Image (spheres, rainbow, N blue to C red):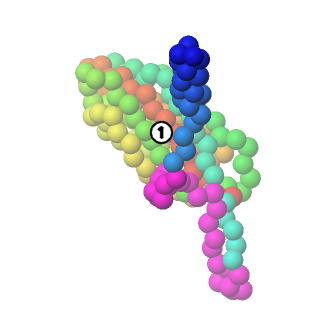
C-alpha cells in the first residue's frame, strides 16, 4: 500500500510540473510596433491608411586600425515601390578596450551619415527621411586612432 501511495504521489508531482501555468496580467504591452497609421485626406476628410514597415540587417565585426576604414558591410532592402524612409535606427556594440571611431552609414541614394562612437549605443536619425529606401545600404567604421572593433544592426523604417 505504501509503494502505491509513493508511486501515485511521484506521478502526480511529475504531471503537475509538466503542465504550464498561465497567469493573467493587466500589465501594459511594451515595444509594440504599429503596422499602420491613419492619416486624413484634407480635401475629403476621409481616412487614408499608410502602412509602415521596416527591413533590417546586421554587420559582422568591423575592425578599423589607426585611422583606416573597416570592411564595408551591406544591407539590401527588399523590392519596394513608391516607398520613402521615415526613420533609421542603429544599435552599435563596441568591444571593450576599443578606441573611439566613426560609424558611417551610406544610403542607396548616396547620402552619408556619420557618428562618433565612444562606446556601445543605440540611436535613431532622420537624416535619410524622404529618400527611397530601395537598394544597398553600406555600413563601416573609420578609426580615429588606435584599434576599434564594433558591430551594428540597422533597421530602416519606411512607408509605401
- At 45% from the left and 57% from the top, the residue drawn is 27
Say what secondary structure mark 1 lies in.
Answer: strand
- At 54% from the left and 24% from the top, the residue drawn is 9
On-image quarter of the C terminus: bottom right
Please state the horizontal and vertical placement of residue 61, each as a whole percent of the image: 44, 21
On-image quarter of the N terminus: top right
Residue 41 seen in the current view: yes
Residue 117 lies left or right of residue 126; in this view the side is left
Residue 62 placement: quadrant: top left
Q: Residue furthest front?
A: 1
Residue 135 seen in the current view: no
Image position of 72 with respect to 121: above or below: above
Residue 44 placement: quadrant: bottom right
Please state the horizontal and vertical placement of residue 46, each as a whole percent of the image: 71, 81
Q: Is residue 95 magenta?
A: no
In the depicted view, which residue is nearer to us: 1 or 116? 1
Look at the image and give the residue range highlighted in magenta. Answer: 24-46
- The rendered magenta stretch, by its main secondary structure, is classed as loop
- At 51% from the left and 39% from the top, the residue drawn is 154
Please state the horizontal and vertical placement of residue 49, each as a whole percent of the image: 69, 68
Where does label 1 land, which residue?
105
- At 49% from the left and 23% from the top, the residue drawn is 60
Amino acid at each position: 500500500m505504501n509503494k502505491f501511495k509513493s508511486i501515485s504521489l511521484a506521478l502526480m508531482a511529475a504531471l503537475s510540473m509538466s503542465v504550464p501555468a498561465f497567469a493573467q496580467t493587466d500589465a501594459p504591452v511594451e515595444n509594440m510596433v504599429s503596422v499602420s497609421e491613419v492619416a486624413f485626406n484634407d480635401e475629403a476628410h476621409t481616412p487614408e491608411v499608410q502602412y509602415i514597415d521596416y527591413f533590417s540587417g546586421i554587420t559582422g565585426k568591423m575592425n578599423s586600425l589607426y585611422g583606416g576604414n573597416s570592411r564595408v558591410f551591406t544591407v539590401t532592402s527588399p523590392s519596394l515601390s513608391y516607398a520613402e524612409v521615415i526613420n533609421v535606427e542603429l544599435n552599435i556594440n563596441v568591444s571593450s578596450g576599443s578606441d573611439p571611431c566613426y560609424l558611417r552609414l551610406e544610403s542607396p541614394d548616396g547620402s552619408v551619415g556619420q557618428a562618433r562612437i565612444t562606446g556601445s549605443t543605440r540611436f535613431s536619425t532622420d537624416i535619410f527621411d524622404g529618400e527611397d529606401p530601395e537598394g544597398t545600404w553600406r555600413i563601416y567604421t573609420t578609426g580615429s586612432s588606435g584599434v576599434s572593433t564594433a558591430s551594428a544592426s540597422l533597421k530602416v523604417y519606411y512607408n509605401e
